[in-house]
Image (cartoon, rainbow, N blue to C red):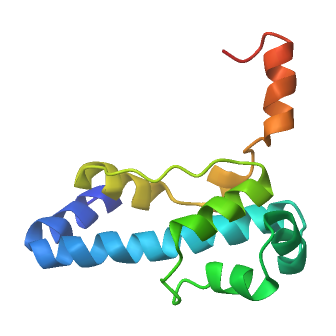
Amino acid sequence: MSTFENIWRKLASSKSYREEFALSLLKRSVPFQVRTIRKKRSWSQSELAQQANLTQGVISRAEDPDYGNLTLNTIGRIAAGFDLAFVGRFVSFSELARFSNELSESQFQHIPIFEEENQLFERGELS
């Protein structure tokens, strides 16, 4: 059985499982992304905090999957510190299962900052 099928069977078991799975993935995936992108850039938590106009303690909590109380404002400021955008959106459970199945550090290794994208745009390579 594939990982997707395994996840899907668990999601199909009950609505309460789906609710818990979705919330757990949300609480784990945002900290995972923050930590992965920060490390890719070889930044300390303090460096990210400075770029995001936050404290190092806020960044530490943002990287803690057990914290679970990040505000959209904090996530937005962290994204701005990275010179990236963060998009939160409602999705179907099949999309959530695929996202869960594909979540890895490699997904975040090549996210260009705005200036890199702008150079591509200026050269006509971004449309």
**What is the x, y in percent for residue 98?**
37, 52
Say which quarter of the image contains residue 21.
Answer: bottom left
Q: Is residue 65 above or below residue 43?
A: below
Residue sitting farthest toward the top: 124
- Asked whether, in this view, residue 107 is left or right of residue 38, the answer is left
Q: Residue at x 87, y 24 (%)?
A: 119
- Which residue is painted at 69% across and 63% down in the image? 77
For the N terminus, the quadrant is: bottom left
- The residue depicted at 64 percent of the width and 47 percent of the height is 85
- Whether residue 64 is situated above or below residue 76 in the rendered picture: below
Q: Foreground: 112 or 86? A: 86
Q: Is residue 29 above or below residue 68?
A: above
Q: Nearer the viewer, residue 70 or 119?
A: 70
Snapshot quadrant of residue 16? bottom left
Name the residue rendered at 39%, 50% in the picture: 89
Viewer-proximal residue among 55 and 62: 55
Whole-percent x, y for residue 13 in the image? 9, 72
103 in relation to 58, above or below: above
Q: Dividing the picture into quarters, in which one does residue 51 lie?
A: bottom right
Quarter of the figure that contains the C terminus: top right
The total number of labels drawn is 0
Residue 90 spot, x, y in % from top left: 32, 51
Image coordinates for residue 121, horizontal then vertical, percent: 79, 18
